[in-house]
Amino acid sequence: MIKNCLFAVALLSLALAGGCAKGGNGIVPQPPMISINGPADFPFNSMYPTQSVALTATVGTTTPMPVAVTWSVGPASACTGTPNPCGTLTPASPPTAATYVAPATPISGVEITATSLSDSSETGSVAIAVIPVSVVVTPLTVTVGESLVQQFTAIAVPVDAPQSFTWSVTCNSNQGCGSIAQDSAVVATYTAPSNAASVTVQAAWNPSPAPNPAPTGQSSVAVVASRLPAGTYSFQFSGYDNSNNAVAAAGSFVLASNGSIPADAGVEDVLSIVPPNTLPQPQQYPIASVSYVPISSSNNLGTLTLALTGGPTNQYTAVPTSSGIIRMIESDGMGTGSGVMQKSATPTVFNADSQRFVFGFAGVDSSLDRVGSVGLLPMTPSASGGTISGGALDANDNGSVVCNPAPCSIATSSVYSQPDGSLSTYWNMTLITGSTTQHFDFFVAGGGTTSQTTPLTLYAMSTDPTDATHPALAGSMVYQWPGTMNAPITYNNKAFCPTTNAACTSVSNLTGANANVSLTLGTTDGTSGGTGGTGGFTGTFDQNNNGTITSVGPAAPFSYTYVATTINTNEYLGRYTFSMLGNPNASPVVNPLTFILYASGANRGFLLDQSSSSVMTGTMNPQPTNLTGNYAPSELPGIYAASTITTIEPSIVPVVENLILTSPGGIPPASVVGGTLNPGGQALTGAYTLTLPGTGTITLTNPTLPAVPTSVIYAIDATTVANPASPTLPNYVITDFMMMGTCTPQGTPATCSSGPPSSIIFAQQ
């Protein structure tokens, strides 16, 4: 990871001289201290080649005074020749100041020394390191539709280096590579050719004077006929119809190379209000057709249309990520909501062997009050599908714990099967807990079984008519690492944070009834010690409870606990209790809520509030261990697809955004937000911040509704890029993040004076 460690270092040569002296206590007084200073926060230890800095020499600490000095650069054995490999140092007149210009070639171990003209024993020095410049282009890899346009950003690191680039494209096609045009100092727009090609987009660092050779960064581009290529896809959606009734949907389909869907190769489940009934009722429709059409030749924005046989034709405004995941909001006038669609894993990934999944579902009961459930599903394949044995479930129905004692045990007679062989991603599931039998459909989405960071994910929906014992539920099932039951992890406190001698940080996103949402940055200590065998859970959070803002910041963080709990016969299978969202700084103190977490891996899993009628549900996602408390604003520049992750109130307007984050450089580096917000096609301008823990803000300067003027951001997953400048330098990191609207705080407690209620947006490159 590369970043500027913005500090000035003064190395002082001081000595105590012993022996006899005239008078006093027999000790020769220390000479005054000389300090060499540059601009505030100047990074002497990470200068870029040819960088210039104005230096001053001062003496004293309480009230520093300029002092005339002799300037030198050393060591003498290394700093000789023309041009000087250590750079050039030009004294001013009078010599209380000087200008240092770094060499064109990186070097370390250089010191600049100032020696007092009036007393040669008075000296001061500063260490200099000139590091290579590296260039990173984002997105790193991207699929671009033929004749469509895709924007790219570039950043030169260290970020105080001039952010100036020359862009070019090369390819393996003799039919054309497309073209690229520079939009600003750090953003360029690529126009793809009308033919398939493998293209490299390159940005070369181009300051004045330009180095030779110039450091470069590049992106790999696949030009394809469609942003929705042939393959099998799964999707899920939640929102509200025009009567403010909750609606949820999930499904899967096979898209042929000609854009059609073969017979019986597409199905969508819908939970919605069906007149004259007043409860959500399940319906299933064959999918007749699916299409994706770019909007205004943009590679990052389009209209997704799903036509249902015997049902409606839904349209969505969609933003694809660079990896092909599509995030969408409804735009057909029949309601509002948000969802996600992605290519499904190959049929051999799911049910290839005995696998464990954890899940998080949310919905409503027969009184239309909010319900949430989380749990564990050990799934063993059989000839007809498979069985579920040894699982568990926790549920909260409008503030009431469903099972007492918790958790509910899932009976060994629970099963799953594949109803239609022509659609390999479509499955049925029967869960039996006590006297209650619940039925679900689930659809195999993306991911795999070889990585914790991209786990296999299934989209699930209940299919029972809603009544007193059958709530309407929808959500996700995620492969638990390692999901193979032949080599299970004992999920005790230590397993949740397995890093030796280090803490683990995570970001939890939570949504609940009445537009109550929050983001928490928490640190687990990974120990099984402490009172009662608990582990420590400390951190900060921001909460937006329908416009009322609560923030617990780093100056006075919360300090709570977490603990592994057993399932069935004293097995630690991934069930934990967490204390979260309390406010120890309030008067009176606000006690935390109790959450149940089912782990899908180390430092990650599904969360359920067990102690309030908000029934807050969500996920915990880890920050990379190597980035704990070590983020920098220079790691955010990029092109993001951002969307509301779930719509929990009819009054909330879900959004999709093409966010462009850039850094024009400087000390401290400036940060700029651009892009487009939908609905409305609103151009966005603003700025962002990011602090070492991975939290910050995005402030928009020109928003109209439904944009939110101010949002907090919480960095999560990251992609590491090998440093192209030097293998000895740290890698660069590209970061995804969550954001939550805080609007414009007014009054005490702070409330939103205008704008939509609270929501959480996921921004992904």
Image: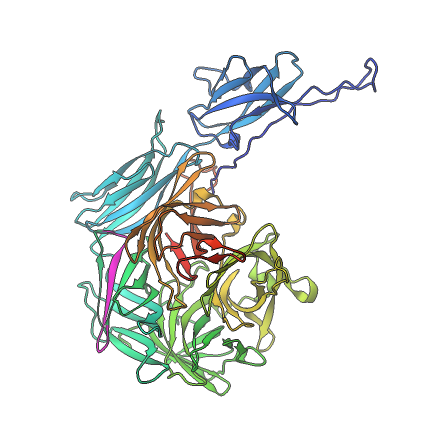
Query: Quick check: is 303 in the magenta stretch?
Result: yes
Quarter of the view holding residue 459:
bottom left
Q: Tell me the quarter of the picture where residue 551 sits.
A: bottom right
In the image, residue 239 sits, relative to residue 165, either above or below, namely below
Q: What stretch is highlighted in magenta?
A: 298-312
In the image shown, does 433 or 413 lie closer to the viewer?
433
- Residue at figure coordinates x 44%, y 15% from the top left: 82
556 relative position to 734: left or right: right
Residue 714 in picture, x, y percent from top left: 47, 53
Q: In this view, does 662 lie to the left or right of 306?
A: right
Q: Who's the residue at 46% across and 49% down the image? A: 697
Q: Where is residue 41 in the image (x, y as percent from the top left)?
A: 52, 33
Q: In the displayed structure, does residue 265 sit left or right of residue 627?
A: left
Q: Nearer the viewer, residue 690 or 543?
A: 543
Q: Is residue 685 magenta?
A: no
- Residue 182 lies, in percent from the top left, at 27, 38
Which image quadrant is residue 158 in?
A: top left
Q: Where is residue 510 in the image (x, y as percent from the top left)?
A: 48, 64
Residue 520 visible in the current orientation: no
Relative to 530, say whether 281 is above or below. Answer: below
**In the rendered view, does 731 fall on the left or right side of 36?**
left
Height in image: 400 above or below 599?
below
Disc count in the image?
0
